[in-house]
Image (cartoon, grey):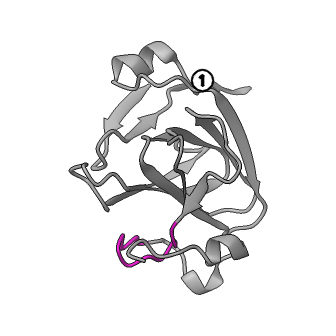
Amino acid sequence: MEFVKTRINGAYLIKRNVVQDNRGYFGRLYCSREFKENGIEEEFVQDNICLNKKKNTLRGLHFQTIKEEGKLVACLKGKIWDVCVDLRSDSVSFCQYYAHELSEENQYMLYIPKGCAHGYVTLESNSLLLYKMTEFYIPGNDRGYRYNDPSFGIEWPVKLDNLIISDKDQNLPYYRN
């Protein structure tokens, strides 16, 4: 795997190396040795999977508070625009965001460190995501901020009036409030 530092302190864009032939492809999603060699020491304790049936589905910006979580996000099918927002007030990249396209085709993953919010929008229907989490989900511990919060200035690659978004995400607070 190839680990590329992003402008968010501790976040990495990770290129999966796959071997392809006429049958398809084979590759790794995770190798603890390679992650440790690149400074990611957290243990992943839970895997989540998410299917997004429609293009322009937006989820986020989400995070946990009591037990902050790191996330490794891979798009196994389809295509998404994945976003990491640094919420750590002591970080050099505080209130900045990093975004990148993740897809089955490009084989990229995004590692989002603890203390950051995560969101994405689907660029294709039937986009399937795998999340590896460093903490267990704690009901009632999840929080979020609005996807269009001016504090972050995220440039989404879709028209925001065409989004498919949950009522919960649509009504998340703005950061400065």
| Residue 22 drawn above or below residue 11 | above
Label 1 element class: strand
21, 75: nearer the viewer: 75
Estimate the x, y position of residue 30 in percent, counting from the top left: 55, 24
74, 21: nearer the viewer: 74
Which residue is drawn at the image coordinates 33% and 36% (left, top)?
4
Name the amino acid, label 1.
Gly
Give the residue pinned by disc 1.
27
Q: Residue furthest top?
A: 33
Q: Quadrant of the C terminus?
A: bottom left
Which residue is drawn at the image coordinates 25% and 49% (left, top)?
91
49 vs 19, left or right, is right
Residue 165 visible, this orientation: no
71 vs 38, left or right, is right
Estimate the x, y position of residue 27 in percent, counting from the top left: 60, 23
Which residue is drawn at the image coordinates 50% and 42% (left, top)?
68
Q: Residues within 10 Å of mark 1 (few under 14, many from 20)?
A: few
Estimate the x, y position of residue 164 in percent, counting from the top left: 70, 75
Q: Is residue 154 magenta?
A: yes
- In the rendered image, which quarter is residue 13 located in? top left
| Residue 36 drawn above or below residue 102 | above
| Residue 151 drawn above or below residue 2 | below
The magenta region covers: 145-155
- In the rendered image, which quarter is residue 170 located in? bottom right
Q: Is residue 21 magenta?
A: no
19, 119: nearer the viewer: 119
Q: Main secondary structure of the magenta part?
A: loop
Q: Quadrant of the N terminus?
A: top left
9 vs 165, left or right, is left
